Image (spheres, grey):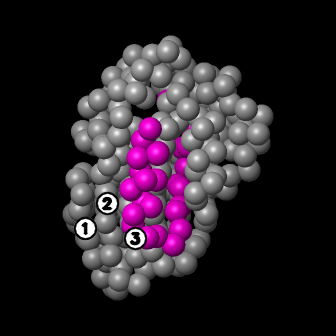
Amino acid sequence: MRFAILSDIHGNLEALQAVIQHIEHESVDEIICLGDIVGYGPNPNECIELIREKATIILAGNHDYAPIGKIDTSYFNNYAKIAIEWTGDVLKPESKNFLSKLPLFEQHAGIFLVHATPHQPGEWKYIFSLDDAIEQFLSFEGQICFIGHSHSPVIFIEGKNYNYHLSYENKLHVRNDERLIINVGSVGQPRDMNPNSAYAIFDTETQGYCLNRIEYDIVKTQKKMKAADLPGFLIARLQVGQ
Ligand code: ZN
């Protein structure tokens, strides 16, 4: 099976359309979305509609549950809170209903899929370092766990004291004796100093992993955010990928 795995779209329709267009030339069997379809960006309903049409598995992120009141939002920073409130106001009833039913994790074709962490996925913790990753390897079965959430692509290998930061297009062959936690980065709000959308391709037969970076019309998204009166900080960060 050849999978396209993407995460953290955050209501950025231009980014999602560019990524889907790229995926359509990659002859994948399935598209998997690891959550945070909405929040921050100006097109939450449109992103939900497009990802529902294209993906076979869609998981929940914290920004999917927050605008529908499914989780406590007190720990979000002010910019996020403003965007969550705005998103909650513009979401259609059908979109809210869809978000409310998204699962926290899935096991599919021997791969573990989750937005934040395999251990207590509803706690929305981050895996930034090897130390963070160590205990997480105990909480999933199989060889590979794909995650999103931090918006920074990275690969942690169990028992190894280094990690791979794949910021630009990069390939990795997964060895049969390795266990990995792979963050596929963000489609709609990259934070690794590369503003291009990130998404991954993984082939279960060849064990080949590839991170793709896709250009999209950032200015168009920013104009829509300005028109929606979303915070300037959120608009500016798209340009730098931070
Ligand atoms: Zn996110």
Q: Is mark 1 on a helix, strand or loop?
A: strand
Pinpoint residue 165: horizontal percent, then vertical percent: 24, 55
Distance between the Cα atoms at labels 2 and 3? 9 Å
**Residue 211, numbered circle:** 2
Q: Is residue 182 left or right of residue 97?
A: left
Residue 4 lies in quadrant: bottom left
Pinpoint residue 54: horizontal percent, then vertical percent: 58, 57
Pinpoint residue 104: horizontal percent, then vertical percent: 63, 55
Residue 183 lies in quadrant: bottom left
Density class for disc 1 (Cα within 10 Å; few <14, some 14-19, many ≥20) is some
Q: Which residue lies under the disc numbered 3? A: 202
Hey, what amino acid is under mark 3? Phe
Q: Which residue lies under the disc numbered 1? A: 171
Distance between the Cα atoms at labels 3 and 1? 10 Å
- Nearer the N terminus, badge 1 or badge 2? 1
Q: What element carries label 3?
A: strand
Q: Does the residue labelled 2 lie within 8 Å of ligand 1?
A: no
Q: Residue at x 61, y 63 (%)?
A: 56
Q: State which region is magenta.
A: 14-40
